Amino acid sequence: MKYAIISDVHANLEALESVLEDARARGVKHFICLGDLVGYNADPEACVDIIRDLGCPVVMGNHDAYTVAEEIPEIVNGRARESLEWTRNHIRPDQHEWLTHLPMQRRVGPLQLVHASLHEPDNWNYVLNAIEAILHFHFQDSPVCFFGHTHMPMYFSTKERKTHKEFERIELEPGERYLVNAGSVGQPRGDDKRAQYITYDTREKVVDFHRVKYDVKKTCEKIRSAGLPEHNALRLEKNDLEAAAALKLINGAKSLVDSLK
């Protein structure tokens, strides 16, 4: 059996549709979603419907949790908060109910699934290095666990106490445990802005990483038309340093215009 494992869709419809098309072209019939269906981008309703219609195992992400919470936690920063407030007004009641009941973690046969970490999953801890992975491994009793949250593909194993980044393929060894990040469909970080996902062949015990082109221009037009933060679009169009510099110029120009009023 081959699974396509997707994470951090973040309401990016064009990226999600392109990833699903690519996965199906590879013969994939089974899907797993690691959370954060919503946030940042302009199609939360459509993306939630698509994932629901897949009928696949899904776990809750922090943006899903904040969207359905009574109040957005104070720790959530400005752009993310603004995006979440917009999202809370752009999903249907039935979608709100469905998101509310997503589990924090789950099993699919021998696989474990979580959005952030099996160590205190509702605290949304980031696993970005081998030291942080050690805490997670205390709670992983399966051969492989898939996670998201960081928007960066990487993996860890109990055999090698180091961080493996930008992998193409992992051949799982018997007796070892692996923690594998699927990257992000809807808001990948770094210089390569193509949508990301992984496939897992349960027979061959192989994980493959994939990048997929999608209509970034259309997604960004929707972000701007919706009145979502400009940074959300810049982050898809440019690498992270360029996005930060562009936003600084935009904010500087706005401040100058305001001072002249």
Image (tube, rainbow, N blue to C red):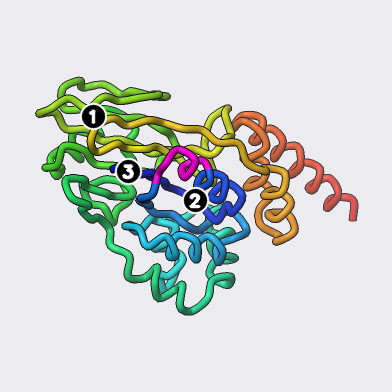
Circle 1: element type: helix
> Type of residue at label 2?
Val
Q: What stretch is highlighted in magenta?
A: 22-28
Distance CA(mark 3)–CA(mark 2) = 13 Å
Residue highlighted by disc 2? 9
Q: Earlier in the sequence, mark 2 or mark 1?
A: 2
- Horizontal side, residue 104 vs residue 232: left or right: left
Nearer the observer, 31 or 43: 31
Q: Which amino acid does label 1 sit on?
A: Ile
The dot on residue 147 is 3
**Residue at figure coordinates x 39%, y 39% from the top left:** 182
Q: How crowded is mark 3: few (under 14 residues within 10 Å), some or many (20 or more)?
A: many
- The residue located at (16%, 32%) in the rendering is 177
On the rendered structure, is 192 left or right of 169?
right
Q: Mark 1 or mark 3: name the one nearer the start of the chain.
A: 1
Residue 188, visible in the rendered structure: yes
Picture quadrant where residue 71 is located: bottom left
